[in-house]
Image (spheres, helix red, strand yellow):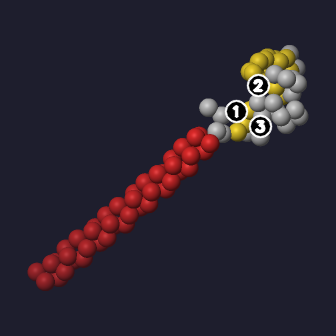
Amino acid sequence: MGYYKCPRCGSTDAFEGTELNNGRKVSVIKCRDCGEILRKKKDYFLTEEEKRFEAEFEAQYARDKEAREKVDEDLVLKIFLIICVVVLLYILIF
């Protein structure tokens, strides 16, 4: 699993807690060493294994998308050819 890195002190030791904000409890991620509130997108980093997994997932998604588009193109071509044959048969018969 990924990790949080504190921009203030560089620590990767973090915990999830709650704070009061305008009378409401808000869930936050904090640095255990200095108390800095960490942001989910900015201060969260993936491990090398997670980066590889994400890259493989995106590559597989791209291949699947390309295959689906190819199937769609083939289907459109087949339908077009069937329509052409039907029209030619209609012209020849009548």
Quarter of image, res 74: bottom left
Q: Give the amino acid at mark 3.
A: Asp
| Residue 77 placement (x, y as % from top left) | 31, 70
The numbered mark at residue 14 is 2
Q: Marks 2 and 1, Cα distance to the nearest angstrom?
A: 8 Å
Residue 56 visible in the snapshot: yes
Q: Are marks 1 and 3 in contact (CB under 8 Å)?
A: no
Q: Marks 3 and 2, Cα distance to the nearest angstrom?
A: 11 Å
Q: Of callouts 3 and 2, which one flags the residue occurring earlier in the amino acid sequence?
A: 2
- Residue that carries the numbered disc 3 in the rendered image: 43
Q: Marks 1 and 3, Cα distance to the nearest angstrom?
A: 8 Å
Q: Are marks 2 and 1 in contact (CB under 8 Å)?
A: yes
Residue 38 visible in the snapshot: no
Quadrant into which the C terminus falls? bottom left
Q: Give the amino acid at mark 2.
A: Ala
- Residue that carries the numbered disc 1 in the rendered image: 3
| Residue 16 placement (x, y as % from top left) | 74, 21
Quarter of image, res 83: bottom left
Q: Secondary structure at mark 3?
A: loop
| Residue 43 placement (x, y as % from top left) | 77, 37
Q: Give the amino acid at mark 1.
A: Tyr
Q: Residue at x 15, y 78 (%)?
A: 89
